[in-house]
């Protein structure tokens, strides 16, 4: 029994020595998001007696490399879907005769979310709420960050931006409106569009050059060429500064000097004209 035990120990030792004296192809890689460069950690064993080795990588997407420590951005064939690639490493010693060894492993490429969206304004007369009309991604497991004019406004999936929060941006100027979406796999995309809206220029309003007089206003009274109702006067930032609901041909307006927009209902049609107060 003692001789057998010694023989087993010697055999195992010889295997260990042999393993340490042979080529061993080995590497590791971390799963990445689509478009992110994968970094391969080459831990292959090349004993000194082989005088070094050559490395041949086959990435599984039709591309190859001979770098010892390659980086690679995979070419996906299934947009929007998770995809696995089998990567193979072959090492060949520089000795004569040469020896070879190879190993394979899989890498998963996760898809990036589609963050695109469209928006509109729910115009309620005195207030304007911004609503999302279409949205590509609404997965509840994702992280969402809505940003308007450089300020984070919401982390809801599909938020409604109330008038009190967006009123400073209702001036007709261009503002960046972005959505960042991040998945549980930490893959993210950002979609950017332009927010531009002025409640003084709603399509349903018809501009009438002879709606009111005098223009400029001198005495604080606005006279209308026709009987009107639902009068609204807004400053050029879109803020409502005066309103009158009943039918009339004249209203008293004590606004500060400046440019305004006056809208009024005439037989069911909303007419508008710019007004200068001096």
Image: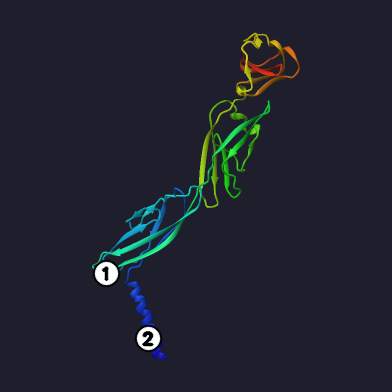
> Relative to 171, is 192 above or below?
below
Q: Nearer the viewer, residue 251 or 191?
A: 191
> Relative to 102, is 223 above or below?
above
Residue extending farthest to the left is 96
The residue that appears at 38% across and 80% down in the rendered structure is 12
Question: From where the camera sits, is residue 193 visible?
Answer: yes
Residue 29 is situated, as x and y percent measured from the top left of the image, at 43, 58
The residue that appears at 39% across and 84% down in the rendered structure is 8
Quadrant assignment, res 224: top right
Which of the colour schemes (rainbow, by chain, secondary structure, one colour) is used? rainbow
Q: Secondary structure under badge 1?
A: helix
Q: Could you say which disc has been placed on residue 7 in the image?
A: 2
Badge 2 density bin: few <14, some 14–19, many ≥20, Cα 10 Å:
few
Q: Nearer the viewer, residue 239 or 97?
A: 97
Decide if residue 231 is on the left or right side of residue 26: right
The residue that appears at 34% across and 79% down in the rendered structure is 14
Q: Secondary structure under badge 2?
A: helix
Quadrant assignment, res 165: top right
Decide if residue 58 is on the left or right side of residue 165: left
Residue 78 is situated, as x and y percent measured from the top left of the image, at 48, 49
> Relative to 33, is 10 above or below?
below
Residue 260 is situated, as x and y percent measured from the top left of the image, at 62, 17
Residue extending farthest to the right is 246
Decide if residue 179 is on the left or right side of residue 218: left
Query: Which residue in the protein does label 1 denote?
Result: 49
The quadrant of the image that shows the N terminus is: bottom left
């Amino acid at each position: 029994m003692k001789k057998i035990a010694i023989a087993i120990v010697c055999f195992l030792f010889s295997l260990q020595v042999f393993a340490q004296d042979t080529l061993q192809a080995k590497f590791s890689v971390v799963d990445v998001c689509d478009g992110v460069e994968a970094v391969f950690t080459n831990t292959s064993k090349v004993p000194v007696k082989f005088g070094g080795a050559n490395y041949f990588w086959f990435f599984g997407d039709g591309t190859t490399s001979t770098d010892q420590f390659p980086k690679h951005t995979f070419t996906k064939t299934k947009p929007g879907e998770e995809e696995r690639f089998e990567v193979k490493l072959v090492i060949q010693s520089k000795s004569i005769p040469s020896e070879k060894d190879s190993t394979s492993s899989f890498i998963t490429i996760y898809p990036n979310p589609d963050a695109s969206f469209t928006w509109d304004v729910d115009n309620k007369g005195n207030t304007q709420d911004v609503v999302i009309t279409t949205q590509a991604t609404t997965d509840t497991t994702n992280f969402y960050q809505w940003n308007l004019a450089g300020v984070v406004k919401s982390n809801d999936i599909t938020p409604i931006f109330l008038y009190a929060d967006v009123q400073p941006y209702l001036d007709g100027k261009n503002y960046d409106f972005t959505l960042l979406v991040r998945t549980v796999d930490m893959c993210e995309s950002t979609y950017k569009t332009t927010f531009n809206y002025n409640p003084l220029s709603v399509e349903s309003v018809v501009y009438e050059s002879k709606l009111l007089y005098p223009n400029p206003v001198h005495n604080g009274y606005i006279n209308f060429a026709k009987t009107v109702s639902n009068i609204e006067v807004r400053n050029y930032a879109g803020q409502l500064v005066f309103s009158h609901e009943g039918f009339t041909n004249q209203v008293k307006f004590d606004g500060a000097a400046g440019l305004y927009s006056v809208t009024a209902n005439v037989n069911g049609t909303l007419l508008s004209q710019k007004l200068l107060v001096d």
